[in-house]
Image (cartoon, rainbow, N blue to C red):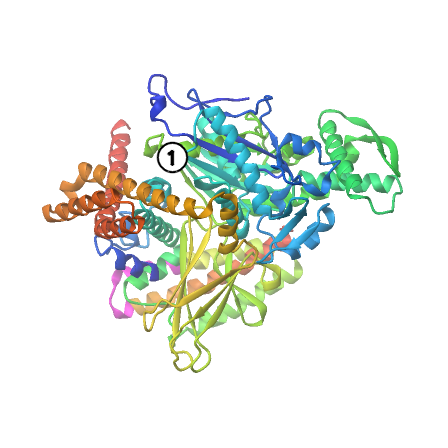
Amino acid sequence: MRLWRELQHIRPVDLQKNFFELFNLPVSFQIDLDLLAERYRAIQSSVHPDRYVNADKRELRLSLQYATLANEAAETLRSPLKRAIYLLQLNGIDVAREDYSGPMEDDFLLLQIGMREELQNVAEQEDPVALRKFRAEVNEITLSLEKDFVGRIEEKGETNLIKAETSVRKMQFMHKLKQEADRIEERFLDL
Amino acid sequence: MSLLQITEPGQSVEPHLRKRAAGIDLGTTNSLVAGMRSGVMTTFADEHGHHLMPSVVRYRPEQEPQVGLTAYQSAKTDPVNTIVSVKRLMGRGLQDIHRIGNRMPYEFVEGDSGMPYFRTVNGNISPVAVSAELLKTLAKRAENSLAGELDGVVITVPAYFDDAQRQATKDAAQLAGLTLLRLLNEPTAAAVAYGLESDAEGVVAIYDLGGGTFDISLLRLNRGVFEVLATGGDSDFGGDDIDRTLAEWILQQAGFEDDLSIAQLRSLLIYCKDLKETLSAEESTKVFVDLGDLRWSGTLCRSELNELMDPLLNDTIKACRRTVRDAGIDYTAITNVVMVGGSTRIPLVRQQVGNLFGKEPLTDIDPDRVVAIGAAIQANVLVGNKSDDEMLLLDVLPLSLGIETMGGLVEKIIYRNTAIPVAKAQEFTTYKDGQTAMLIHVLQGERELVKDCRSLARFEFHGIPPMAAGAAHIRVTFQVDADGLLSVTAMETGSGIETGVEVQPSYGLSEDEIVTMLQESLTSAQEDAEARALNESIVEAQRMINALTAALAADSRELLSAQEIAVLNEGMGRLQSVMEGLDYQDINDAVELLGKASEEYAARRMDAGVRAALAGLQIEDLETGLEQ
């Protein structure tokens, strides 16, 4: 979001828009990704620095910033996790803050420990079938967390927002597991 | 040779209104230049009809260097002064050379910023200066073909080039006196040439194996928008390496264990290149080496060569698999595979790539020329010869950017395959009371350790107000532009003071070196510098007036108040009056003032453009909806 402030500093107009509004999309977790891709291309076709090669330096710089912003916005909205974090941010919750001391339910802690162990076993046994199964499991849990998140964020209200944040923190953990599974898979595939 | 018809008959722009643009493929082994002639995009030949120009420069005492074929022909007899494959040294440091240098028959000396210079009979020459000679010759060829001075060029670089290699290429363009419109990734250029010719839509894989570099890019083609999904490769592997492997095989067969002389090595490598090319057409060939004390004869068949190449090509296939994975797509989603680069003529390459993607690779457009053609198409668009809404290239950062943290580790700040332009800001803080300076080491690469990544630059921030440890915050913004080049800005966020920054590029030429080289290339440096500064100011001022006049005519009523219009008109009037004087400083000041005044307007126009683009889409959706 720092870039955002920089842009405001140069151009206090119209760009109070958030990432969703930039693409003319409803501020919601459930967005049409094809529509996003299409509008992303349309916006880049209008603001990309290649359209301003013959413009003066300021205008070129403005176009660079606008194209950068469009890229950041599209990247944020494309990823379900980043989109969820961004939605929390629009509701005044910074997931990256350092003083977070919210609760993690015991059963989720147990699930974390169990899944870590499972992944370690998969890696040690170099078993691609088990890895596929593990990834499917991570996907399934992630989907149910996303569903939970949608319910909470759309209801608003303080309690719901706190619950929504908890869901996002769980999604973050699942995302990390998925990344580790990716790395193990890369090893299996000899990449 | 395949030709691309760009303009519709009867719609071509009047010849005298056309700007002259060229696309330059600056290759490791060969280079090409292309442009539009008589409405047709074509590569340009020299006076002997050769399109490919060997990327070779030969330095001679107190004479202009020889460039291209004549230089190539003396590579065997004068190897030390004849620079081949200079692209491999662009943006590289001496420590890289110690590795590559053993394979290269040159003498190196260290330049001011650790850059390797070739020791030649005509003095010490940097790789950037060698590349500039190649560029000058190619540009001259284009100017002869287009009958006039070039307004701008697009130069291609391997997609996998890092920041230092890109910067070095840009420096070479500056040194050659060219107006660089854009650095374009080679596979993206190839996709443009291919996509526009075939009207293809969908996901295309571009496998580009040149003399010294390898790239794999996956692009989505959608109504004139070329969107790179992921890219991978090796900027230090190419057909040259196959020649070298073949040379080692011959030495082994011959039982030759002594060191080869520079001339012998150069001759043997050239011979091996010919052998390799022969075996792309023939099943087997006779080998006859007679180089002084190195003599050997025998036969070599294609399957033997394949065996030698197999482990090398395997790495490229692995890179393809990794890139498909990075793109997050399935092999079945890839509609076409296009081969680019001379080395893709090798049957084994085609076979392995075909096997991996499960498709016959396309070779319809000459793999040597397709990159230059694509670059020329882009140059033509950027220079302003085509209307704006037709083609757009969206590229990605090939290698992650990061900074050094405790313990020699790299913390990634921008990940590879992120769409560019991109910016990320990071806060740094002081760790000692009263600390007034800070060093930030920027690296590029995928590995975790500093020593395994490429060092781009060290930034020293000084003039931080003395405060308690942790109280000063420096916000560093890393901006990668559309050329894939990084720039860094820093600000102390507590006091809002822009801190002084000193940049030490790890390998590139320093700003001073460039200036010195530019001055050396001018005969009467002082006069020229003054005249040039004035000229540049006038050009910039005129450009601004033209752009603003056109903008005001188009949409000032919708976007500006009467008062705002009056302010801009007044600023233009002031600029016009100082332009009649001969003081470039006055002109620059007026440009600056008008620029500030018009910034808000520019921003509103950009917003309006975005609104119009999105509205256009909705109308289209509505129309398709009605049709259905």
Number of residue marks: 1
- Report which quarter residue B610 is drawn in: top left
| Relative to B123, B12 lies left or right | left
Where is residue B152? Give x, y as percent.
42, 36
Q: Quadrant of residue B238?
A: top right
Chain ID at mark 1:
B
Quarter of the image where the N terminus of chain B is located: top right
Q: Residue sitting at 49 percent across and 29 percent down?
A: B142
Q: Nearer the viewer, residue B619 or A6?
A: A6
Image x and y of residue B232, in percent = 56, 46
Residue closest to the far left: B562
Closer to the camera in the image, A145 or B275: B275
Q: Quadrant of the C terminus of chain B?
A: top left
Mark 1: which amino acid?
Val
- Residue that numbered label 1 is attached to: B383
Within 10 Å of the Cα at label 1, are there few (<14), some (14-19), or many (20+) other Cα atoms? many
Residue A148 colored magenta?
Answer: yes
Q: Position of residue B225 (x, y in %)?
A: 40, 36
What residue do we see at 45% from left, 46% from top? Answer: B483
User: Residue A45: x percent and y percent?
Assistant: 34, 40
Residue B345 visible in the current orientation: no
Q: Secondary structure at mark 1?
A: loop
For the question of whether residue B278 can be seen, the reply is yes
Identify the magenta region.
A145-160
The one of B469 and A30 positioned closer to us in this rendering: B469
Query: Can residue B12 be found in the magenta stretch?
Result: no
B443 to the left or right of B586: right
- Name the side, left or right, on which A121 lies relative to A14: right
